[in-house]
Amino acid sequence: MTSTDLVPLPPQPEGVAWPTEAWPEGALAEGVDGPGLAKLLDHAMAQPEEMGQTNAVAIVHRGRLVAERYAEGTDETTTHISWSMAKSFLHGVVGLLVGDGLLDLRAPSGLPYWPADDPRSAITLDQLLKMRSGLHFVEDYVDEQVSNVIEMLFGAGQADVARYAADNPLDHEPDDFFYYSSGTSNLVSAMVSRALGPGDPVDAFVRSRLLQGIGARSATLRFDEAGTWIGSSFVFATARDFARFGLLYLRDGVWDGRRILPEGWVDHGRRLSDPAPTETFSYGAHWWVVPGSLGTFQASGYNGQRTTLVPALDLAIVRLGVTPIGIAPNLNRWMKEVVDAFRPAGRVG
Protein backbone atom coordinates (compact mmCIF):
# COMPACT_ATOMS: atom_id res chain seq x y z
CA MET A 1 0.00 0.00 0.00
CA THR A 2 1.49 3.32 -1.03
CA SER A 3 0.89 6.71 0.56
CA THR A 4 -1.57 7.58 -2.18
CA ASP A 5 -3.63 4.48 -1.31
CA LEU A 6 -4.07 5.53 2.30
CA VAL A 7 -7.31 7.07 3.51
CA PRO A 8 -6.56 10.72 4.39
CA LEU A 9 -6.17 11.52 8.06
CA PRO A 10 -8.76 14.06 9.27
CA PRO A 11 -7.76 17.41 10.80
CA GLN A 12 -9.16 18.60 14.11
CA PRO A 13 -12.57 20.17 13.35
CA GLU A 14 -12.66 23.93 13.56
CA GLY A 15 -13.80 25.15 16.95
CA VAL A 16 -13.11 21.87 18.78
CA ALA A 17 -10.56 22.28 21.57
CA TRP A 18 -7.62 19.92 21.83
CA PRO A 19 -7.80 17.65 24.90
CA THR A 20 -4.41 18.62 26.32
CA GLU A 21 -6.02 19.54 29.64
CA ALA A 22 -9.56 18.16 29.43
CA TRP A 23 -11.56 16.32 26.82
CA PRO A 24 -14.17 18.36 24.97
CA GLU A 25 -17.40 16.44 25.24
CA GLY A 26 -20.44 16.53 23.02
CA ALA A 27 -23.61 14.84 21.89
CA LEU A 28 -23.53 12.25 19.15
CA ALA A 29 -23.45 13.74 15.67
CA GLU A 30 -26.42 13.52 13.34
CA GLY A 31 -26.45 10.21 11.52
CA VAL A 32 -24.87 8.22 14.34
CA ASP A 33 -26.99 5.31 15.55
CA GLY A 34 -27.24 6.45 19.17
CA PRO A 35 -29.65 3.74 20.37
CA GLY A 36 -27.58 1.06 18.67
CA LEU A 37 -24.39 2.38 20.22
CA ALA A 38 -25.96 2.54 23.69
CA LYS A 39 -27.10 -1.06 23.32
CA LEU A 40 -23.59 -2.17 22.37
CA LEU A 41 -22.06 -0.35 25.33
CA ASP A 42 -24.67 -1.75 27.72
CA HIS A 43 -23.91 -5.24 26.41
CA ALA A 44 -20.15 -4.85 26.95
CA MET A 45 -20.53 -3.47 30.47
CA ALA A 46 -22.89 -6.30 31.41
CA GLN A 47 -19.73 -8.44 31.17
CA PRO A 48 -21.14 -11.22 28.96
CA GLU A 49 -19.14 -14.43 29.05
CA GLU A 50 -18.62 -14.42 25.28
CA MET A 51 -16.73 -11.07 25.41
CA GLY A 52 -14.92 -11.35 28.72
CA GLN A 53 -14.39 -8.47 31.13
CA THR A 54 -14.63 -4.91 29.78
CA ASN A 55 -13.07 -2.42 32.18
CA ALA A 56 -13.22 0.78 30.14
CA VAL A 57 -14.51 2.15 26.85
CA ALA A 58 -13.82 5.66 25.58
CA ILE A 59 -15.04 6.84 22.16
CA VAL A 60 -13.84 10.02 20.46
CA HIS A 61 -15.71 11.25 17.38
CA ARG A 62 -14.64 14.34 15.48
CA GLY A 63 -12.32 15.30 18.32
CA ARG A 64 -14.92 15.10 21.10
CA LEU A 65 -15.38 12.46 23.78
CA VAL A 66 -18.89 11.26 22.96
CA ALA A 67 -19.18 8.04 24.98
CA GLU A 68 -17.41 6.62 28.02
CA ARG A 69 -18.14 3.64 30.24
CA TYR A 70 -16.30 2.04 33.16
CA ALA A 71 -16.68 -1.20 35.08
CA GLU A 72 -17.54 -1.10 38.77
CA GLY A 73 -14.53 -0.01 40.81
CA THR A 74 -12.87 1.88 37.95
CA ASP A 75 -13.28 5.37 36.51
CA GLU A 76 -11.56 7.91 34.27
CA THR A 77 -8.60 8.10 36.70
CA THR A 78 -7.88 4.35 36.70
CA THR A 79 -4.73 3.29 34.85
CA HIS A 80 -4.75 0.13 32.76
CA ILE A 81 -2.03 -2.06 31.27
CA SER A 82 -1.40 -1.66 27.55
CA TRP A 83 0.16 -5.02 26.84
CA SER A 84 1.15 -4.86 23.16
CA MET A 85 -0.46 -1.47 22.56
CA ALA A 86 2.91 -0.34 23.96
CA LYS A 87 4.43 -1.29 20.60
CA SER A 88 2.56 1.56 18.95
CA PHE A 89 3.83 4.01 21.59
CA LEU A 90 7.30 2.68 20.80
CA HIS A 91 6.69 3.45 17.12
CA GLY A 92 5.97 7.05 18.09
CA VAL A 93 9.19 7.33 20.12
CA VAL A 94 11.23 5.87 17.26
CA GLY A 95 9.69 8.44 14.93
CA LEU A 96 10.95 11.24 17.17
CA LEU A 97 14.47 9.79 17.15
CA VAL A 98 14.43 9.26 13.39
CA GLY A 99 13.33 12.88 13.02
CA ASP A 100 16.20 13.96 15.29
CA GLY A 101 18.71 12.00 13.19
CA LEU A 102 19.55 9.69 16.10
CA LEU A 103 18.15 6.56 14.45
CA ASP A 104 18.17 5.47 10.80
CA LEU A 105 15.37 3.23 9.55
CA ARG A 106 17.40 1.49 6.87
CA ALA A 107 20.80 1.19 8.54
CA PRO A 108 21.84 -1.97 10.41
CA SER A 109 20.62 -1.86 13.99
CA GLY A 110 24.07 -1.36 15.51
CA LEU A 111 23.08 -3.47 18.51
CA PRO A 112 26.04 -4.89 20.44
CA TYR A 113 24.73 -8.42 20.79
CA TRP A 114 26.04 -9.69 17.43
CA PRO A 115 29.56 -9.56 15.95
CA ALA A 116 29.98 -7.86 12.57
CA ASP A 117 30.23 -11.19 10.72
CA ASP A 118 26.96 -12.47 12.24
CA PRO A 119 24.12 -12.21 9.67
CA ARG A 120 21.86 -10.91 12.45
CA SER A 121 23.95 -7.74 12.57
CA ALA A 122 22.50 -6.75 9.17
CA ILE A 123 18.93 -6.53 10.52
CA THR A 124 17.62 -2.98 10.13
CA LEU A 125 15.37 -0.90 12.35
CA ASP A 126 12.70 -0.88 9.65
CA GLN A 127 12.71 -4.67 9.48
CA LEU A 128 12.28 -4.85 13.25
CA LEU A 129 9.38 -2.38 13.20
CA LYS A 130 7.66 -4.33 10.43
CA MET A 131 8.21 -7.68 12.21
CA ARG A 132 10.40 -8.92 9.38
CA SER A 133 13.68 -9.47 11.21
CA GLY A 134 13.76 -13.21 10.56
CA LEU A 135 14.67 -13.92 14.20
CA HIS A 136 13.18 -16.98 15.84
CA PHE A 137 10.53 -16.15 18.42
CA VAL A 138 7.45 -18.03 19.56
CA GLU A 139 4.69 -15.56 20.41
CA ASP A 140 2.53 -17.96 22.42
CA TYR A 141 0.52 -16.74 25.42
CA VAL A 142 -0.60 -20.11 26.77
CA ASP A 143 2.03 -22.85 26.47
CA GLU A 144 4.93 -21.91 28.74
CA GLN A 145 6.96 -24.84 27.41
CA VAL A 146 7.30 -23.32 23.93
CA SER A 147 6.60 -19.63 24.53
CA ASN A 148 9.44 -17.16 24.13
CA VAL A 149 7.28 -14.20 25.15
CA ILE A 150 6.38 -15.69 28.54
CA GLU A 151 10.00 -16.61 29.19
CA MET A 152 11.18 -13.15 28.12
CA LEU A 153 8.70 -11.17 30.22
CA PHE A 154 8.37 -13.38 33.29
CA GLY A 155 11.14 -15.99 33.17
CA ALA A 156 14.85 -16.16 32.41
CA GLY A 157 14.75 -13.15 30.08
CA GLN A 158 13.01 -10.65 32.32
CA ALA A 159 16.16 -8.94 33.65
CA ASP A 160 17.40 -8.11 30.13
CA VAL A 161 14.61 -8.56 27.60
CA ALA A 162 16.62 -7.31 24.62
CA ARG A 163 19.52 -9.68 25.30
CA TYR A 164 17.04 -12.56 25.52
CA ALA A 165 15.51 -11.62 22.16
CA ALA A 166 18.92 -11.12 20.54
CA ASP A 167 20.08 -14.60 21.53
CA ASN A 168 17.51 -16.19 19.23
CA PRO A 169 18.82 -17.52 15.88
CA LEU A 170 17.64 -16.52 12.45
CA ASP A 171 14.84 -18.69 11.06
CA HIS A 172 14.62 -16.64 7.84
CA GLU A 173 16.63 -14.08 5.96
CA PRO A 174 15.78 -10.58 7.17
CA ASP A 175 12.86 -9.04 5.26
CA ASP A 176 11.79 -12.38 3.73
CA PHE A 177 9.11 -13.35 6.25
CA PHE A 178 6.56 -11.67 8.52
CA TYR A 179 6.23 -13.03 12.02
CA TYR A 180 4.76 -11.10 14.95
CA SER A 181 7.27 -11.03 17.79
CA SER A 182 7.47 -9.11 21.04
CA GLY A 183 11.17 -9.88 21.07
CA THR A 184 11.80 -7.68 18.05
CA SER A 185 10.01 -4.78 19.79
CA ASN A 186 12.38 -5.04 22.72
CA LEU A 187 15.32 -4.96 20.34
CA VAL A 188 13.87 -1.70 19.03
CA SER A 189 13.68 -0.51 22.64
CA ALA A 190 17.35 -1.40 23.04
CA MET A 191 18.12 0.84 20.06
CA VAL A 192 16.21 3.65 21.79
CA SER A 193 18.33 3.05 24.93
CA ARG A 194 21.56 3.19 22.91
CA ALA A 195 20.49 6.47 21.32
CA LEU A 196 19.48 8.16 24.59
CA GLY A 197 20.99 6.22 27.46
CA PRO A 198 19.13 3.47 29.37
CA GLY A 199 16.54 4.02 32.06
CA ASP A 200 15.88 7.57 33.20
CA PRO A 201 17.01 9.32 29.97
CA VAL A 202 14.54 7.25 27.95
CA ASP A 203 11.77 7.88 30.44
CA ALA A 204 12.45 11.63 30.43
CA PHE A 205 12.56 11.76 26.64
CA VAL A 206 9.26 9.91 26.21
CA ARG A 207 7.62 12.07 28.83
CA SER A 208 8.88 15.43 27.53
CA ARG A 209 8.75 14.83 23.79
CA LEU A 210 5.63 12.66 23.46
CA LEU A 211 3.38 12.35 26.51
CA GLN A 212 3.40 15.81 28.09
CA GLY A 213 2.69 17.59 24.82
CA ILE A 214 -0.60 15.73 24.36
CA GLY A 215 -1.60 15.84 28.03
CA ALA A 216 -1.13 12.09 28.63
CA ARG A 217 0.09 12.65 32.18
CA SER A 218 -1.04 9.33 33.61
CA ALA A 219 1.11 7.27 31.24
CA THR A 220 4.08 5.42 32.74
CA LEU A 221 6.59 2.95 31.30
CA ARG A 222 8.13 -0.19 32.83
CA PHE A 223 11.86 -0.91 32.50
CA ASP A 224 13.88 -4.08 33.04
CA GLU A 225 17.01 -4.34 35.20
CA ALA A 226 19.21 -3.46 32.21
CA GLY A 227 17.38 -0.15 31.83
CA THR A 228 15.51 -1.13 28.68
CA TRP A 229 11.91 0.05 28.38
CA ILE A 230 9.89 -3.13 27.89
CA GLY A 231 8.33 -1.55 24.81
CA SER A 232 6.73 -4.78 23.73
CA SER A 233 4.24 -4.74 26.56
CA PHE A 234 4.27 -2.13 29.29
CA VAL A 235 2.64 1.27 29.19
CA PHE A 236 0.14 2.03 31.96
CA ALA A 237 -2.41 4.80 31.33
CA THR A 238 -6.02 5.83 31.70
CA ALA A 239 -8.50 5.18 28.92
CA ARG A 240 -8.56 8.93 28.22
CA ASP A 241 -4.79 9.03 27.81
CA PHE A 242 -4.79 6.04 25.49
CA ALA A 243 -7.38 8.03 23.53
CA ARG A 244 -5.07 11.07 23.50
CA PHE A 245 -2.30 8.97 21.97
CA GLY A 246 -4.75 7.61 19.41
CA LEU A 247 -5.89 11.12 18.52
CA LEU A 248 -2.27 12.15 17.93
CA TYR A 249 -1.99 9.43 15.27
CA LEU A 250 -5.44 10.18 13.86
CA ARG A 251 -4.27 13.81 13.43
CA ASP A 252 -1.12 12.76 11.53
CA GLY A 253 1.21 13.47 14.43
CA VAL A 254 0.06 17.09 14.84
CA TRP A 255 -1.29 18.47 18.12
CA ASP A 256 -2.84 21.90 18.57
CA GLY A 257 -0.96 23.39 15.63
CA ARG A 258 2.40 21.84 16.55
CA ARG A 259 3.93 18.91 14.70
CA ILE A 260 5.06 16.31 17.24
CA LEU A 261 5.79 13.31 15.02
CA PRO A 262 7.75 13.78 11.78
CA GLU A 263 5.73 14.30 8.63
CA GLY A 264 4.89 10.93 7.09
CA TRP A 265 5.62 8.95 10.25
CA VAL A 266 2.00 8.01 10.94
CA ASP A 267 1.76 6.74 7.36
CA HIS A 268 4.84 4.62 8.01
CA GLY A 269 2.97 2.90 10.83
CA ARG A 270 -0.31 2.37 9.00
CA ARG A 271 1.04 1.45 5.55
CA LEU A 272 0.58 -2.26 4.90
CA SER A 273 3.89 -4.16 5.08
CA ASP A 274 2.66 -7.74 5.42
CA PRO A 275 2.35 -9.10 1.84
CA ALA A 276 -0.10 -11.82 2.90
CA PRO A 277 -2.92 -9.99 4.70
CA THR A 278 -5.76 -11.86 6.33
CA GLU A 279 -9.40 -10.85 6.11
CA THR A 280 -9.34 -9.54 9.69
CA PHE A 281 -5.99 -7.88 10.41
CA SER A 282 -2.77 -7.15 8.57
CA TYR A 283 0.37 -5.37 9.70
CA GLY A 284 2.03 -2.04 9.08
CA ALA A 285 4.90 -1.06 11.37
CA HIS A 286 4.11 -1.66 15.05
CA TRP A 287 0.48 -0.90 14.16
CA TRP A 288 -2.17 -3.35 12.95
CA VAL A 289 -4.10 -2.53 9.77
CA VAL A 290 -7.76 -3.48 9.27
CA PRO A 291 -8.65 -4.11 5.60
CA GLY A 292 -11.48 -2.00 4.14
CA SER A 293 -12.33 1.41 2.79
CA LEU A 294 -12.31 3.20 6.17
CA GLY A 295 -8.53 3.14 6.56
CA THR A 296 -8.75 1.62 10.03
CA PHE A 297 -5.54 0.92 11.95
CA GLN A 298 -5.10 0.02 15.58
CA ALA A 299 -2.85 -0.56 18.55
CA SER A 300 -3.74 -3.99 19.87
CA GLY A 301 -2.73 -5.85 23.01
CA TYR A 302 -3.12 -9.16 24.79
CA ASN A 303 -6.49 -9.82 26.43
CA GLY A 304 -8.34 -7.46 24.11
CA GLN A 305 -6.72 -4.06 24.64
CA ARG A 306 -7.58 -1.85 21.66
CA THR A 307 -7.01 1.68 20.46
CA THR A 308 -8.78 1.63 17.10
CA LEU A 309 -8.53 4.59 14.72
CA VAL A 310 -10.92 5.06 11.80
CA PRO A 311 -9.78 7.96 9.58
CA ALA A 312 -12.78 7.94 7.23
CA LEU A 313 -15.12 8.47 10.18
CA ASP A 314 -12.77 10.63 12.33
CA LEU A 315 -13.27 8.07 15.07
CA ALA A 316 -11.12 6.66 17.88
CA ILE A 317 -12.26 3.81 20.14
CA VAL A 318 -10.41 2.65 23.24
CA ARG A 319 -11.46 -0.62 24.84
CA LEU A 320 -9.61 -2.06 27.84
CA GLY A 321 -10.32 -5.30 29.65
CA VAL A 322 -9.65 -9.03 29.84
CA THR A 323 -10.77 -11.05 26.84
CA PRO A 324 -9.04 -14.45 26.49
CA ILE A 325 -7.60 -15.08 23.05
CA GLY A 326 -10.06 -17.90 22.35
CA ILE A 327 -13.01 -15.48 22.33
CA ALA A 328 -11.19 -12.57 20.68
CA PRO A 329 -13.28 -12.93 17.49
CA ASN A 330 -16.36 -11.97 19.54
CA LEU A 331 -14.64 -8.79 20.71
CA ASN A 332 -13.57 -8.02 17.13
CA ARG A 333 -17.19 -8.32 15.98
CA TRP A 334 -18.32 -6.03 18.78
CA MET A 335 -15.70 -3.44 17.82
CA LYS A 336 -16.86 -3.60 14.20
CA GLU A 337 -20.46 -3.06 15.27
CA VAL A 338 -19.40 0.00 17.29
CA VAL A 339 -17.68 1.40 14.20
CA ASP A 340 -20.77 0.62 12.13
CA ALA A 341 -22.89 2.74 14.49
CA PHE A 342 -20.93 5.79 13.28
CA ARG A 343 -21.22 5.06 9.55
CA PRO A 344 -23.48 7.23 7.45
CA ALA A 345 -26.44 5.21 6.19
CA GLY A 346 -25.44 3.01 3.28
CA ARG A 347 -21.67 3.33 3.80
CA VAL A 348 -19.86 0.05 3.17
CA GLY A 349 -16.25 -1.12 3.40
Image (cartoon, helix red, strand yellow):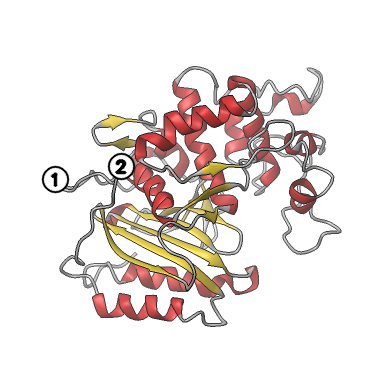
Q: Is residue 274 visible?
A: no
Q: Is residue 319 left or right of residue 347?
A: right
Provide residue 267's location: percent of width, then percent of height: 40, 39
Q: Quadrant of residue 329?
A: bottom right
Q: State the quadrant of the C terminus.
A: bottom left
Please report the residue visible at 37 percent of the width from the left and 47 percent of the height from the top. 244
Check disc 1 and report its element: helix, strand or loop.
loop
User: Badge 1: few (under 14), some or many (20 or more) residues near its Cα, within 10 Å?
Assistant: few
The residue drawn where x is 50% and y is 27% is 205
Question: Is residue 324 left or right of 213 when viewed as pictured?
Answer: right
The answer to whether residue 32 is left or right of residue 159 is left
Say whether disc 1 or disc 2 marks the residue closer to the N-terminus: 1
| Residue 226, image x, y percentages | 74, 31
User: What residue is rendered at 20% in x and 46% in y?
Assistant: 17
Label 1 vs label 2, nearer the camera: 2
Query: Where in the figure is residue 230, as x and y percent of width and height?
Result: 65, 41
Q: Give amino acid for label 2.
A: Thr
Is residue 170 positioned above or below 324 on the image? above
- Residue 331 drawn at (x, y percent): 51, 71
Question: Residue 118, relative to residue 83: is it above or below?
Answer: above
| Quarter the N terminus occupies | top left
Q: Which residue is mark 1?
A: 14
- CA distance for labels 1 and 2: 16 Å
Q: Residue 60, which numbered label?
A: none
Residue beneath the point at 14% across and 45% down: 14
For residue 198, which quarter of the picture? top right
Q: Nearer the viewer, residue 25 or 49?
A: 25
> Which residue lies under the disc numbered 2?
20
**Type of residue at label 1?**
Glu
Q: Give left or right: position of 219 versus 16.
A: right
Residue nearest the observer in this picture, 159 or 177: 159
